[in-house]
Image (cartoon, rainbow, N blue to C red):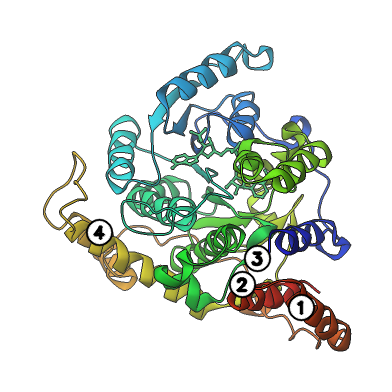
Amino acid sequence: MFITAMASFAWANVNPTNYIGGVSFRPERDIPNLSGKVVLVTGGNTGLGKESIRQILARNPAHVFLAARSEQNAKAAIEDLKSSSSNANTDAKLTWLPLDLSSTKSVQDAAGSFKAQSSRLDILILNAGVMSLPPGETDLGHEIQLGTNHTGHFLLTKLLLPTLLRTAEEEEAGSSDVRVVSLSSIGHNLAPSFETILDQKKLKRCNTHARYGASKVANILFAAELARRYPSIMAVSVHPGLIATDLYAPLGKRNPVAALGSRVLGAVGTPVEAGARNQLWAAVGAKRAELVNGAYYVPVGNCKVHNRYVRSEEMGKELWEWTEKELRKGNANPSTAPGPDHKEGFLERTFQPHHAHHEQQQQQEQKPVFERRESQEEMEIPAQPKPQHHRRRSSTLQRLKEYMGNQDELDEAGKTYAKLM
Ligand SMILES: NC(=O)c1ccc[n+]([C@@H]2O[C@H](COP(=O)([O-])OP(=O)(O)OC[C@H]3O[C@@H](n4cnc5c(N)ncnc54)[C@H](OP(=O)(O)O)[C@@H]3O)[C@@H](O)[C@H]2O)c1
């Protein structure tokens, strides 16, 4: 199973059709001055998050929040970022925001702490993530990778929405530029069925790669749905590439083959400086008019408009409503302690229906939000041609079935393989 999954993942990474297109982007040339901007990056203490902060700081933003779960790691990262020479001239404030995405209370506390320190939020990079973890769950009972990578980020974003929307409205008409960038992955190709993603019992029985894939599907669906519901915010998802970071560390601990695979990935992976380019392009590099709201991009700036998760309004809506319902259930659970800014009906207010939000906005006679830029037609892509490799796939699947034992896992692997071919 591991070999099949890794082969699928590697294939998706090297498949040239995934990389046709894109834009030329050099952060030092293309990121404009960010003065006045407030930025929040989750998982900012290491890897792509820390590198994104490093390059953003060099453009003189007003305030950067480095969200991380470990005080020691966060403070070490801040020290390093502040002392790095390219940032020596910046006046930007750099602040640790304690955040553990696997804990509802921690996410609530983080949102409360952020709001106490800043009245605006221009750029939110939902970067933190875990991969290849053994079975586990968050305090909400969600599968650990889905719960961390998706549910935690969903709650954080929802709690920060009033600030994001207010910031978008404060901008002069037509120049609103609030962005939310979700880190997804080409590993979304490893996901089980959508039905399994929403069924936590079933999801927890899947192998670790499928569970990671599920969380990365959710990241794409979330960005697309956020864009549909709140078009004044530019929300996109990105795959960064295959980058040598700590993300692969748990893989190395699984078994000797996985350890070798992890080492190979480390050797062939893109260095983190270049690896952060796609998310930097989406968050601060690209002009707003260059971005398609709700889209999914592979490096750099290569818009995959045909991605089925971007296109599926049904799945986006269902995931959104399912996550809201799950979080409401969590709030009713006495083991989930409320945050310091908790008041009765806290989550209910946070999750008031979309139309209610708009009605409220209208009542307050606020300025109309930025019109959604792309037309429906731009997102309508003709149906994909039927795959031509049916015979080859079935014989390969047959061989796979003979080689490996567990029928459930084989069926998942077969579906993944078929999808990728
Ligand atoms: N590297 C790649 O090749 C690759 C490919 C595709 C997609 N991605 C995506 O890129 C994003 C960044 O990954 P990376 O490669 O930079 O990995 P990384 O170096 O392992 O960084 C991940 C970050 O997420 C944080 N994090 C993990 N669990 C958390 C939690 N419960 N609460 C708060 N923060 C948590 C980590 O904090 P700790 O240090 O405390 O663990 C760390 O700061 C992820 O979403 C990943 O899925 C990466």
Closer-to-camera residue (187/292): 187
> Which residue matches tag 3?
190
Q: Which residue is mark 2?
A: 409
Q: Given contact means CB atoms under 8 Å apart, are the residues at marks 3 and 1 in contact? A: no
Question: Residue at the left extreme?
Answer: 344
Say which label, 1 or 2, has the lower sequence index. 1
Q: For residue 272, what is the image quadrant?
A: top right
Type of residue at label 2?
Answer: Glu
88 relative to 295, above or below: above
- Tell me what residue is drawn at x 53 percent, y 59 percent: 215
Which residue is identified by label 4? Answer: 330
Q: Earlier in the sequence, mark 3 or mark 1?
A: 3
Q: What amino acid is found at the position of numbered circle 1 in the picture?
A: Glu
- For mark 1, what is the residue? 402
Q: Earlier in the sequence, mark 4 or mark 2?
A: 4
Tell me, yes or no, if residue 418 can be seen here: no
- Residue 154: give x, y in percent of width and height: 41, 56
Residue type at tag 4: Gly
**Quadrant location, the C terminus:** bottom right
Residue 58's image quarter? top right
Which type of secondary structure does the marked residue at label 4 adopt? helix
Mark 3 secondary-structure assignment? helix
Alpha carbon distance from label 2 to label 3: 12 Å
Label 3 vs label 1, nearer the camera: 1
Residue 243 x/y as whole percent:
73, 41
Distance CA(mark 4)–CA(mark 1): 43 Å
